[in-house]
Image: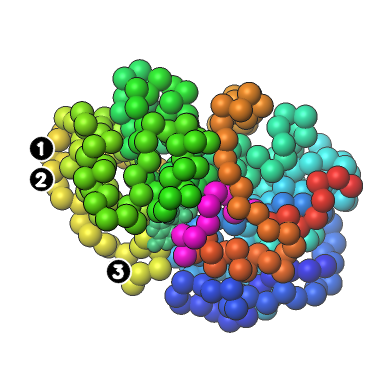
Amino acid sequence: MKLVALKAPVDRKPRADDFALIEAAPPSCPEGGVLVRVARLSLDPYVGSRLRGRHMGEAPPAPMKDAVPGAVVGEVAESRCDGLTPGDWVHSMDGGWCDIAALPGAACRKLDPALAPLDAHLGALGMPGLTGWAGITRLAEVGNGDVVLVDAAAGPVGGVAGQIAKLNGAARVVGVAGGVEKCALVTERYGFDACVDYKKEGWRDALAEALPDGLTVFFENVSADMAMVALSHARPYARGVLCGLVDAYHTDQQSLHPLNAGVIIARRARLMGLVVYDYYPQWDDYMRTAAEWVREGALVVAEDAVDGLENAPALFERLMDGRNIGKCLVRVSPLTA
Ligand SMILES: NC(=O)c1ccc[n+]([C@@H]2O[C@H](COP(=O)([O-])OP(=O)(O)OC[C@H]3O[C@@H](n4cnc5c(N)ncnc54)[C@H](OP(=O)(O)O)[C@@H]3O)[C@@H](O)[C@H]2O)c1
């Protein structure tokens, strides 16, 4: 089998040449588990933190030994687990950068290939989609009349958050994204009402113009600085979902810019931290609802995909630099047997 591992421990933002593609002996099928032929691999921002031992207390992988962790979609090749048989399609958050994964049955969710394109299980229907849905519907409880601001809006989390806000009756959804191409994706394909390019001079004025009556909800993916910008547009009693701080994952100061308590008090704002793990029990329900939106074209996530496991490190470097446009996916092997 093939796998991608770190060459050595890293204590900074990982780069493509920190990784090596290695040949290893194929794993045997574990008792109570399955061997999965990996077809699609998801690359996600948390993996950068995980490699440095900074993610939710989870251990980093061993250099030159363990596959880099990652969510996968694949086909069961061998099973020693009740309820899964060869030929079944599964999703697992416990896969990795490899072409064959040995997984406990409990770490696999069986997929119905007729429900939606299998790729969607790593984006709109996957962990990023679940995150956007949870923040918008379960924490901010977006409904009729809300004005919602989302940053990193071209990515799978932000893109889904904004689209589900609209589907739930938001009056206006405004995105923030870096660059003309990302902003066009957000308005033209995701259907946001406006998107502000924060890499362009005068973007703060453009944001004020896009939010003439302020906002009632913001969904923060990037930084405490951006959360403060959002708060400066908040109407009284606004709700803020704090989902990610991707701008700070590789700085040495994890504490960052402190949120200004005076502003939070004056706006009577309610800020809520989001960890998607809390919503895993609701994943299958979300998946069925969202699959209908995906089939109807009402929920779209652009893919930034490459072919072949050997190209995962370069795509990951692009993600770490924020140069990805859409959901980062690696096509490891075909979706048909
Ligand atoms: N709380 C949870 O449980 C949970 C679960 C999943 C994901 N998340 C978080 O949700 C956020 C979005 O995730 P995603 O998978 O949808 O990623 P993504 O949006 O595809 O990629 C991250 C985006 O962040 C923006 N960015 C801004 N500053 C950056 C920097 N210094 N370095 C790198 N990127 C930067 C870039 O977009 P622009 O150029 O448009 O700024 C980049 O494309 C991340 O913060 C992630 O950690 C949280």
Q: In the image, what residue occupies the spot 68% across and 77% down?
A: 20
Residue neighbourhood size for the residue with mark 3, other residues' Cα within 10 Å, grouped as few (<14), some (14–19), many (≥20)? few
- Give x and y (percent) for residue 291: 64, 28
In-front residue for pair 234/95: 234
In what element is the residue under mark 2?
helix
In front: 283, or 190? 190
Tell whether label 3 touches label 2 (CB within 8 Å).
Answer: no
Q: Which residue is mark 3?
A: 253
Q: Amino acid at mark 1?
A: Ala
Residue contact between numbered discs 2 and 1, judged by CB atoms under 8 Å: yes
Query: Which amino acid is tagged 3?
Result: Gln
Q: What is the number of the mark on residue 262? A: 2
Query: Is label 1 in a helix, a strand or a loop?
Result: helix
- Would the CB of label 1 be found within 8 Å of ligand 1? no
Extreme residue toward the bottom, this view: 8
Which residue position is annotated with label 1? 266
Left or right of 208? Residue 335 is right
x 80%, y 73%: residue: 24
Image quadrant containing the N terminus: bottom right
Q: Which residues are magenta?
A: 321-329
Horizontally, residue 103 falls left or right of residue 248, namely right
Q: CA distance from mark 2 to mark 1?
A: 6 Å
Q: Tell me where residue 305 appears, x and y as whole percent.
A: 65, 54
Does 324 lie within the magenta span? yes
